[in-house]
Image: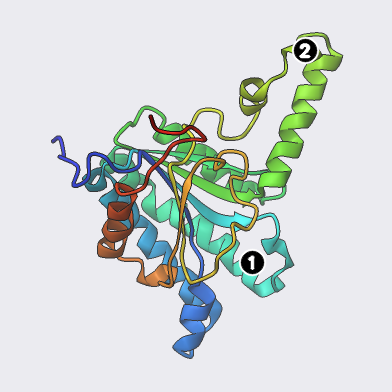
Amino acid sequence: MTVTPINPDGPNHVAIIMDGNGRWATQRGRPRLFGHQAGAKRVRQAVETCPQLGVKYLTIFAFSTENWKRTQSEVAGLMALFRRYIQRESNYLHRLGTRVRFIGEREKLDSKLQKLMDFLEKLTEHNDTTHLTIALNYGARDEVTRATQRLAVEIAEKRLKPEQVNSEVLASFLDTCMLPDPDLVIRTSGEARISNFLLWQSAYAEYEFIDTHWPDFTPDVFETVVGRFGGRDRRFGAVKA
């Protein structure tokens, strides 16, 4: 069934910094992991809502390279949550026609989680309704560093000449090389910073910093934020005639 988008002039690619799980839980007298569990449920709703909003690509920031600084118990709990999420949601995401990709440095993640990530990517590789990208152990500076290292190898082994390197070539070495750049970046929970997320890709993205904690990010909130996108004047550095 073809879904008619609510806002056909809305963003094609939305990226979300899902912030506020821990604070949401603390406000309710619950442990931080309770908030992360509630936040995981919102991911399903966000994916379900994307076709209605005309959003083809959704990228979510699940765990950053800096999040390893959190307590050992919270990190362990998050890793267990990621494993359970993939095990529980794989078939549902596949039935929705969602293609799932992961970006970030995988080698630091435990082998069971890596295998589950590989399984979900393979399961959904031919889907095209919504493209869900999960940034897991991801940091934009780390991404650009790794891309530059791979680029340097290409030059050292004479498969690429230095003068051939431009922004398009560098972008082809990024984790997101298969994705369009985000049109809209949303950060929940009232913080107005980008926290090392998609720095290269978001050069011309529109930003929305909203007070809503991620576990309260309902489809109605999503629709409201996306609805504001149509009123933006996006000139990409040019001046309208």
Classify 10 Å Cα crowding around label 1: few (below 14), some (14-19), many (20 and above): few
What's the residue at 76%, 26% (across, down)?
150
Residue 30 visible somewhere in the drawing = no
What's the residue at 53%, 38% (across, down)?
118
What's the residue at 26%, 41% (across, down)?
54
Which residue is label 1 attached to? 76
User: Of residues 236 and 145, which is closer to you in this image?
Assistant: 236
Classify 10 Å Cα crowding around label 2: few (below 14), some (14-19), many (20 and above): few
Q: Is residue 124 above or below residue 209?
A: above
Q: Is residue 116 above or below residue 238?
A: below
Residue 149, position as x, y percentages in the image? 79, 30
What's the residue at 65%, 47% (across, down)?
111
User: Of residues 63 and 185, which is closer to you in this image?
Assistant: 185
Q: How is the image coloured?
A: rainbow
Residue 18, position as x, y percentages in the image? 48, 61
User: Of residues 230 and 58, which is closer to you in this image?
Assistant: 230
Q: Secondary structure at mark 1?
A: helix
Kindly identify which numbered label has been placed on residue 129.
none
Residue 179, position as x, y percentages in the image? 48, 32
Q: CA distance from mark 2 to mark 1?
A: 45 Å
Tell me the kind of residue under disc 1.
Ala
Of circles 2 and 1, the one toward us is 2
If you read the primary sequence from the N terminus, does the residue marked by circle 2 or circle 1 appear first? Answer: 1
Which residue is label 2 attached to? 163
Residue 153 visible somewhere in the drawing = yes
User: Of residues 176 and 90, which is closer to you in this image?
Assistant: 176
Q: Quadrant of residue 166?
A: top right
* In the displayed structure image, the side of residue 179 where residue 9 appears, left or right: left
Tell me the kind of residue under disc 2.
Glu
Residue 83, position as x, y percentages in the image? 52, 56
Q: Residue furthest right?
A: 156
Which quadrant, please, contains the C terminus? top left
